[in-house]
Image (cartoon, rainbow, N blue to C red):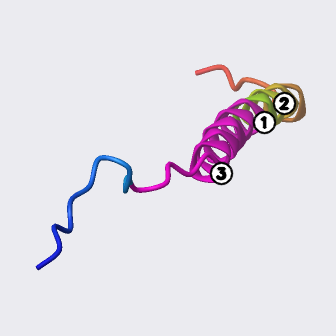
Amino acid sequence: MKATNHPSETKPRYVWPWFIAAAVIVAVIIAVFAIRAEAIRVKQQRQFAIPEQTK
């Protein structure tokens, strides 16, 4: 019988999943900053559009 675990038979290590993981992380970070910037812009527009009411 042949031994199946030879030191020369190692599984290949793929690099491309790391690039995809990095791209997903960068996309999430960019989305968070973009949404935050839009929320600040909308908040500023609402402050100018609706004057404060006095009680």
Give the numbered dot on residue 41: 2
Q: Which residue occupies the extreme bottom position in the image?
A: 1
The answer to whether residue 19 is magenta is yes
Of callouts 2 and 3, the N-terminal one: 3
Please name the residue that numbered disc 3 is placed on.
16
Q: Nearer the viewer, mark 2 or mark 3?
A: 3
Q: Which residues are magenta?
A: 11-35
Q: Main secondary structure of the magenta part?
A: helix
Mark 2 surroundings within 10 Å by alpha-carbon count, few (fewer than 14), some (14 through 19), many (20 or more):
few
Question: Relative to residue 10, is residue 18 depicted above or below?
Answer: above
Residue 18: x percent and y percent? Answer: 59, 43
Please name the residue that numbered disc 1 is placed on.
34
Estimate the spatial distance between the alpha carbons at disc 2 and disc 1, rounded to whole Å.
11 Å
Estimate the spatial distance between the alpha carbons at disc 2 and disc 3, rounded to whole Å.
38 Å
Under mark 3, the amino acid is Trp
Residue 42: x percent and y percent? Answer: 80, 37
Under mark 2, the amino acid is Arg
Question: Relative to residue 2, is residue 42 depicted above or below?
Answer: above
Residue at image location 81% in from the left, 27% down from the top:
51
Residue 35: x percent and y percent? Answer: 72, 39
Residue at image location 67% in from the left, 44% down from the top:
19
